[in-house]
C-alpha cells in the first residue's frame, strides 16, 4: 500500500512555530482582580483570561492553551502561539494564589510549620532542584528544575517536603490518615493499576480516594489525583485493580487506560508493526494531559477512536513505520533558525503513526518532546524505531497543529468540528471537499469500528 504524500499538509502547519521565544510582556498594566491562576493541563477555551507569573493573558487558541508545558503563558517557548499578553497585573490580582486566599502571609514569605520559612511559590519563577516553596498551606521541594510549574499538578517536578527549617512537617496534621472509622476496608494501592474517580485505596496506613482517574499514580506524591479520605465506608473500593469485580464500561470495552485495553488494541490491529505497541501509545499519551482527557466520557472516547483511526490510515493499518517514497524533505527556509537546519546525511521523509515529514516538523516536535531541536534533527529515524517517541510525534501533531484545517484535530473532535474536522486538519487539502471521498470513507470506517469496540457514540460531522 502506498502511504499518502505528506509534504503539503505539514509545511503550513509548521510555520506556526516560527516564534520560539517566550511570550514577551507588555509594558502596560492590567487589573487582574477576578482572574484565576493559570494551571498546566487545565482546559481553556478561546477568550479565556488567566493570570500567571504576575501577568494577565487571554487564550487565542483553546487547543494549545489547554496543553500547558511549551504553551504555558509567559513561560513556554511556544506560548505566543496560544496566548495574548494583556499586561502586568497592577497589584490587585497578580500573585500565584489560585482563587481567593493567598498562600502568603502578609506579603513576605509563607512560614512553614517546621521552623524556618519558605518563599511562596510563584508561577513563572525559575526553581532549581532542591528549592523549597510554600503552596496552599504545605511545603514542597523541587525534584527537578522547572519554570514555576504548579507543585500540586506537576508532581514529577515537585514533591511534598517536611518543611524549610528542619522541623515538623508542613502537611496538615502531621500524621497519616487512618483508613479505619468508615467500616469496610480498602484494597492496597498498586502502582500501574488503573483507578477511576471515586476509587478508594489504602496506602502507608492511610486511606485515599481518587479525585481524578489515573494510571496508578502515588497517592502521596500525586496529590492532584488523590486526596485523603475517612475510610471505605463498608462497601470496599470501586477500584478496577486486583480482585474480581471489573469496573469495565458497557459495550464490551473501554475498561483500559484511554478506554482501550491491550487486548482490544491487539485485536483491532492484528497485523501491526511492533513499533505500534499499546504500551507505547499509553506511555506517549500520558505526555499530553489534555489528550483523551477533555470533555465528558463520550467526547474522550471519540478522541481516542478518531486519533487511532487516522493514524491507522496514515500507516496502512499500522504496517508502515517509514514512508515508501523516501524523499529528502529538507527545507531550511522556514524561519526556524540554524538549529532546525537539516543535518548532513539525514532525510526527513514520513515516519511513525502520523508519518512526520520535513526537518521543520522534526525540529518542532523534538523541541516539544525533548526540549531541544537536536534529538530528532540529528536522528530522525528514532521516530521509526522508538515506540513511545513515534506515538509522541503523532499526538504532538494531533494536539498542536492545524494543518490544512482551521484548528487542531484535538480541538475539532472535542468541539464542533467532529471527526470530519480531524481529517481536514490532517490531510484536508488533498482529501476533503470531494477530492478523495474513497480515502475519507476509509478513515470513517476505521473510526466507526474503533468507536464500537471501546463503547463510544459519535456526534455526527464525520465527513469533510
Image (tube, rainbow, N blue to C red):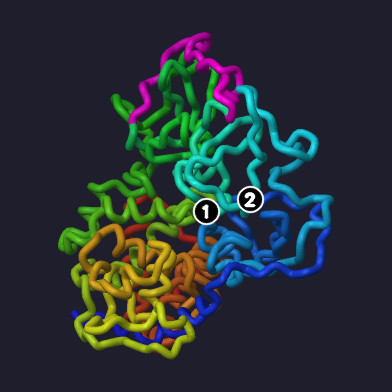
Observer-side mark, 2 or 1, equals 2
Label 2 neighbourhood size at 10 Å, few (<14), some (14-19), many (20+)? many
Residue 323 placement: quadrant: bottom left
Mark 1 nearby-residue class (10 Å; few <14, some 14–19, many ≥20) = many
Q: Nearer the viewer, residue 123 or 458?
A: 123
- Secondary structure under tag 2 reads loop
Q: Is residue 460 visible?
A: no
In the picture of the structure, the residue carrying the numbered disc 2 is 123
Q: Residue at x 38, y 36 (%)?
A: 216
The numbered mark at residue 294 is 1
Which residues fall within the magenta stretch? 164-190
Which of disc 1 and disc 2 is earlier in sequence? 2
> On the picture, is 215 further left or further right than 55?
left
Q: Position of residue 109 (x, y in %)?
A: 71, 37
Tell me if residue 187 is in the magenta stretch: yes
Q: Is residue 90 left or right of residue 25?
A: right
Q: Quadrant of residue 276?
A: bottom left
Q: Is residue 52 magenta?
A: no
| Main SS class of the magenta portion in the image | loop
Amino acid at each position: 500500500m502506498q502511504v499518502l504524500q505528506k509534504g503539503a499538509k505539514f509545511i503550513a502547519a509548521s510555520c506556526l512555530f516560527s516564534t520560539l521565544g517566550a511570550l514577551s510582556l507588555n509594558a502596560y498594566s492590567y487589573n487582574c482582580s477576578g482572574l484565576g491562576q493559570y494551571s498546566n493541563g487545565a482546559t481553556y477555551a478561546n477568550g479565556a483570561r488567566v493570570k500567571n507569573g504576575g501577568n494577565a493573558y487571554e487564550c487565542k487558541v483553546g487547543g494549545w492553551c489547554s496543553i500547558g508545558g511549551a504553551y504555558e503563558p509567559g513561560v513556554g517557548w511556544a506560548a505566543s502561539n496560544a496566548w495574548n499578553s494583556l499586561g502586568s497585573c497592577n497589584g490587585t490580582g497578580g500573585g500565584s494564589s489560585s482563587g481567593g486566599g493567598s498562600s502568603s502571609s502578609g506579603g513576605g514569605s509563607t512560614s512553614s510549620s517546621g521552623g524556618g520559612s519558605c518563599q511562596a511559590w510563584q508561577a513563572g519563577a525559575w526553581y532549581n532542584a532542591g528549592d523549597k516553596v510554600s503552596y496552599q498551606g504545605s511545603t514542597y521541594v523541587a525534584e527537578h528544575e522547572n519554570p514555576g510549574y504548579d507543585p500540586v499538578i506537576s508532581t514529577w517536578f515537585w514533591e511534598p517536603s517536611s518543611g524549610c527549617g528542619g522541623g515538623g512537617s508542613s502537611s496538615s496534621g502531621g500524621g497519616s490518615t487512618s483508613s479505619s472509622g468508615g467500616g469496610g476496608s480498602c484494597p492496597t494501592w498498586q502502582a500501574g493499576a488503573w483507578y477511576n474517580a471515586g476509587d478508594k485505596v489504602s496506602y502507608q496506613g492511610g486511606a485515599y480516594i481518587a479525585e481524578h482517574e489515573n494510571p496508578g499514580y502515588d497517592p502521596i506524591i500525586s496529590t492532584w489525583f488523590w486526596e485523603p479520605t475517612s475510610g471505605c465506608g463498608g462497601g470496599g473500593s470501586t477500584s478496577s485493580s486486583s480482585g474480581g469485580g471489573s469496573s469495565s464500561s458497557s459495550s464490551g470495552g473501554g475498561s483500559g487506560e484511554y478506554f482501550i485495553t491491550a487486548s482490544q488494541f491487539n485485536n483491532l490491529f492484528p497485523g501491526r508493526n511492533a513499533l505500534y505497541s499499546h504500551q507505547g501509545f499509553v506511555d506517549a499519551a500520558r505526555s499530553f494531559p489534555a489528550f483523551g482527557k477533555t470533555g465528558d466520557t463520550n467526547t474522550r472516547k471519540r478522541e481516542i477512536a478518531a486519533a487511532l483511526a487516522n493514524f491507522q490510515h496514515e500507516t496502512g493499518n499500522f504496517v508502515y513505520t517509514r514512508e515508501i517514497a523516501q524523499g529528502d524533505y529538507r527545507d531550511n527556509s522556514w524561519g526556524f533558525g540554524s538549529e532546525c537546519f537539516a543535518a548532513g546525511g539525514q532525510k526527513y521523509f514520513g515516519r511513525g503513526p502520523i508519518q512526520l515529514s520535513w526537518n521543520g516538523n522534526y525540529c518542532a516536535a523534538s523541541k516539544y518532546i525533548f526540549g531541544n531541536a537536536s534529538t530528532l534533527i540529528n536522528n530522525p529515524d528514532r521516530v521509526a524505531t522508538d515506540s513511545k517517541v513515534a506515538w509522541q510525534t503523532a499526538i504532538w501533531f494531533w494536539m498542536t497543529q492545524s494543518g490544512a484545517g482551521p484548528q487542531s484535530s484535538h480541538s475539532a473532535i472535542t468541539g464542533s468540528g467532529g471527526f470530519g474536522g480531524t481529517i481536514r486538519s490532517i490531510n484536508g487539502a488533498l482529501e476533503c471537499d470531494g477530492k478523495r471521498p474513497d480515502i475519507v470513507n476509509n478513515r470513517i470506517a476505521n473510526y466507526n469500528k474503533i468507536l464500537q469496540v471501546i463503547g463510544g457514540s459519535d456526534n455526527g460531522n464525520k465527513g469533510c
